[in-house]
Image: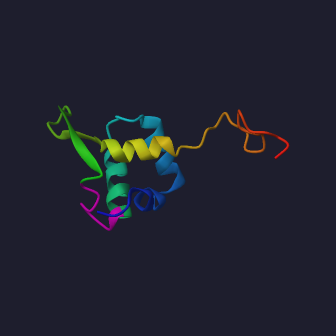
Amino acid sequence: MADIAALLGRLAQDELEELRALGPQGYLPRHLISALDNAAGGPGAGRGYYVPTGSVSETGGPHLALRSDVSDWLFRHAPHASQNADAPAPGDSVND
């Protein structure tokens, strides 16, 4: 399996935003599963980056979510929309 950062780096910005909007344990829609597979190398190559949650959809298919370490990486490295990039972070000295 490839590096998590490399895999997520191959996703489009809108795909990353949609993953973040789903939340850390959100169910992945088919188009995002396909995007993860493509980023990992092709059909089915993303298996392992997403895992079954233990529940099933109304059609009987398993709900899939990001593996916990993939989700942790995605949310730990998410940009903070409320933080102005030009403003110093809390605790930063403006005289450095």
Q: Position of residue 69 (x, y in %)?
A: 34, 45
> Main SS of the magenta segment?
loop
- The number of discs equals 0
Closer to us: 87 or 51 = 87
Which residue in the rendered view is the most extreme toward the left? 60
Q: Residue furthest right?
A: 95
Q: Residue furthest bottom?
A: 41
In x, y percent, where is residue 94? 83, 41
Q: Is 59 situated left or right of 43 in this image?
A: left
Q: Is residue 44 magenta?
A: yes
Task: Report the magenta residues as a range.
Answer: 40-47
Q: In this view of the protein, which residue sits in the foreground, 91 or 28?
A: 91
Residue 37 in percent (x, y) is at 31, 59
**29 lies above or below 13:** above
Q: Nearer the viewer, residue 84 or 29?
A: 84
User: Residue 45 lies in magenta, yes or no?
Assistant: yes
Question: Would you say 7 lies left or right of 49 here?
Answer: right
Q: Say which residue appears at 34% left-offset and 34% top-offset.
A: 25
Q: Position of residue 79 (x, y in %)?
A: 59, 43
Query: Which colour scheme appears in the figure?
Result: rainbow
- Nearer to me, 23 or 31: 23
Quadrant location of the N terminus in the rendered image: bottom left
Q: Residue at x 52, y 46 (%)?
A: 77
Tell me the quarter of the picture where residue 39 sits. Answer: bottom left
Residue at position x 71%, y 34% from top? 91
Q: Quadrant of residue 80?
A: top right
Dividing the picture into quadrants, the one containing residue 42 is bottom left
